[in-house]
Image (spheres, rainbow, N blue to C red):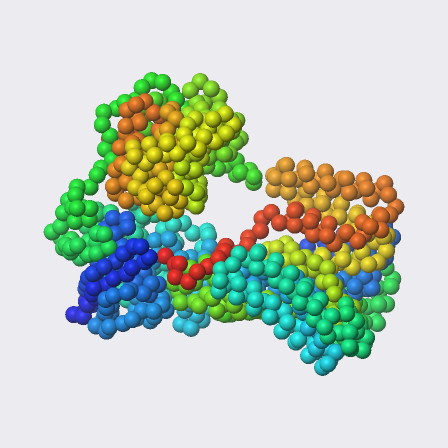
Amino acid sequence: MPSDVDAVQLRGIGKRFPGVIANHDVDVTIRSGTVHALIGENGAGKSTLMKILYGVQRPDDGTITIEGKDVVLKSPTEAIDAGVGMVFQHFMLADNLTVLENMVLGAEKLHGIGDAARTEIRRISDRFGFDLDPDVLVEKLGVAARQRLEIAKVLYRGARIIILDEPTAVLVPQEVEALFVNLRELKDAGNSVLFISHKLDEVLAIADDITVMRRGTTVGTADSHTATKRQLAELMVGSELPSPETEESTVTDTVELSLDGVTLTDEFGRNLLTDLSLKIRRGEVLGIAGVEGNGQSELVETIMGMRIPSAGTIKLGDQDVTHWHTRQLREAGIGYIPEDRHRHGLLLDAPLWENRILGHQTRPPSAKGMWINRKGARQDTERIVADYDVRAPGIDTPARALSGGNQQKLIVGREMSGDPVLLIASHPTRGVDVGAQAAIWDHIKRARRAGLAVLLISADLDELIGLSDTIQVILRGRFVGTFEPSKVTPQDLGTAMTGGEAA
Amino acid sequence: MSTATATSTKRTIVERLTKSWLYIGLIGIGVVSFVRIVTDTDDLTGAGTIRAAIIATCPILAAALGGLWAERAGVVNIGLEGQMILGTWGAAFFTYHYGPWVGIIGAAILGLVGGLLHAIATVTFGVDHIVSGVAINLIGAGAATYLAEAVFPDYEGGGPRQLNGLEAPTQITIPGVSDLAKDVADRHWFFVSDVASFIQALTTNISSLSLVMFALVVVSAVVLWRTSFGLRLRSCGENPQAAETLGVNVYLYKYIAVLISGALAGIGGGFLALVSSSGFSTGQTGGRGYIGLAAMIFGNWRPGGLLAGALTFGYTDSLRLRDTQSVHALLLLVALGLLAFAAFRAVRKQVRGALVVAVIGVVVMVWFLATDSVPREFTVMTPYITTLFVLALGAQRLRMPAADGKSYRRGSAG
């Protein structure tokens, strides 16, 4: 039941943080009963804008009009009262509470916290096909179910305008399809949806209207029926989107890393990894696809010597390195881009040149005998900053002050130094902007041409298909399928990743 | 279909929990009874011992409950000890002037002041919870010593470091039950007499404040798990950012939780001054705030669990006040407990853990068989050693509130 009054009008919104202008002159109009997509690169200011609309942060300038009424949103409570609900990119759920508890939290007055609430949750769940059981702990739910719970939470509060912040980032293609079915039902029931994304295919598939943001402001709108990917991409980045495509094969016959029957058991005797075997040759990129939490992290940690496999052997070149320590492995020439650069890759409060030393503390140029070589490390950091285009005020800047993309480029530069023979790259472009992504892809491609063996783990299926020479799919700690990147589609991979028929 | 499954899972969980608690309780009493008969130490479950155990349990229980409230809201309150010390002084001062019940309220208020300090530091200013807690322990001890020296020497029965002769809260005896239970307990039958002496202790000259403490466990459980207030409070300890996005005033709930936490610790201090001994003396908490915290952790941040933890610590604490014979018998109990735990682990295929525990169990068993008594010095250490053992062995699959001890700033959601 689309009405004539627009669901949301944002006019001239501006928001400044110390040293950063997050939003300025933002204008967005969401028509009632439509799916409206807001697209833009990472750091374009989409998330800040959404937090303003949801009352988490207050705008410095501009007006918000919801269903014809001017509103000032001082807190999420007021946004909820105005009919706005938000599903955050990082889910706002308490793992140790049940579905019911998460659902009624903050809205206890509506249906209490007992059976009436349970009935209402079942009603919403059945109406939109969410398949939620009120009495299950949230930690038992998968990613897609958590997202459905988040949407149900918003509906439970009677929201008519639903904001979804990059909802598909964590889903496999099949789950995205299911989500879109849910969204269309929401739309048919008269709700308005604001869908934030930077995946253009998805935007074109689901949205009615599109607004593009770049550098903190809205730079244009488009009609999803007539717009093309190319137009949107150009609006988003001001130029053609980079693609991760590889050139001709550089695979050689020399095996650099081989795993044979590697099995890893946890303290309770459950298998985290079961009988994994693989070979990576010099000049080859082996991609690992899988839904997160299916053993990728454990596989990387096992190869890196952080976990000891309970069976099987790991060989680097001709040497059996199954029981080597991490430092020995690194000294033997393994570079490692960890999946979470904040937790594993960097000391955020240490300067760049100290971060350069991490993992290289025993080798020149960072070390001289048993001493740290300050001068050498600093010089080499200057080299990395220049060669890898790390945009930083200087090498004494703390790593925290850099953007995600520049932090990642520093890590890539560090791991590529000292002529590694094997690079383990875990989500190398996660959370970095398009420019840095292209640069990192270039570095990986160049290293591959120079004969580096690469183990690439990524949740970005386009990246896997574009960079890899072979793709292995991992599911519950087992390899369940091998694919040729030139012949596989993201849908095929998605099927294999979720345990469907492997090709 | 989904409805049916949901209710049935719910029911089985409830059944399993109540049943397992019941079984563990029954088996526990059986083992203790067995040890009592084997070692011929009737004191092990004598009504006197259990009475002492209850008295030793209550302050620990109060501190544990205090810890539960604060940590469920995501604030680690290691300042419980300091708040307890403040409570001992408050209880003494107010009891001297206005009688024991006002004294307890006074203890709660003094503890609450300690909690307020902790809340201001950790919630408003984002100070590290441990740093703030340690500071409160120092402040609490210092303030109580100072106040005692400044006020108590002028009082009757008072001195710079103590105030004696305080009136205790009423003691309750249920006439018929008490005598009957004593009668059965004195026969020293297997199992039955042990249960009887437990009943005897609960119905004969039990302090009304002890009953209040046990009631507070139930009240806490109901408030925290069965009301929307409790749900909001717990959500602040699990994911304050999520709570914020749903319109929960996280700062307010954390404040309330830490204030209640301090007040409970204060009441625990009051119990020490009025019931455990009939007077105030400086330093009489003796680390019970920390043991309370340990009991809460052992109890997996749950009311029933922390009650079990507090009883364990209280029981061992009371044994040390009795003779060395009982502590010697306790060795057998510990050995059996360890071996049972080892078996449990072996069943779960945790081979290495099972071996370690089994070896320790055998060593304790050999110690028991090879000796007739334990050194006096050892008996004084029992509660602390128990703390160490229980935490090291039991605390391996615990689930603390997810955001416990983490600093939270408003506006950090998303």
Q: Quadrant of the C terminus of chain A?
A: top left
- Tell me which residue sits at (74%, 42%) in the image: B361
Of residues B16 and B100, the one nearer the viewer is B100
Q: Left or right: where does residue A482 sit relative to residue B196?
A: left
- Can the viewer see residue B16? no
The residue lying furthest to the front in this view is A375
In the displayed structure, does residue A57 sit left or right of residue B146?
left
Residue A159 image offset from top left, x and y in percent: 31, 67
Residue displayed at 63% across by 37% down: B351
Q: In the image shown, does A221 or B92 lie closer to the viewer?
A: B92
Residue B69: x and y in percent read 57, 64
Q: Is residue A454 among the parts visible in the rendering?
A: yes
Q: Could you say which quadrant of the image residue B273 lies in?
A: bottom right
Q: How many marks?
A: 0
Q: Position of residue A462 (x, y in %)?
A: 27, 38
The quadrant in which the N terminus of chain A is found is bottom left
Identity of the residue drawn at 73% across and 59% down: B286
Instruction: Judge whether B292 appears above or below B328 on screen.
Output: below
- The residue sitting at 30% across, 52% down in the picture is A166
Outermost residue on the bottom side: it is B98
Q: Nearer the viewer, residue A92 or B354?
A: A92
Q: Is residue A452 above or below residue A476?
A: above
Q: Position of residue A374 (x, y in %)?
A: 44, 33
Give left or right: position of A236 versus A102: left
Residue B392 higher or lower than A252, as above or below: below
Toward which corner of the image does residue B44 lie, by quadrant?
bottom right
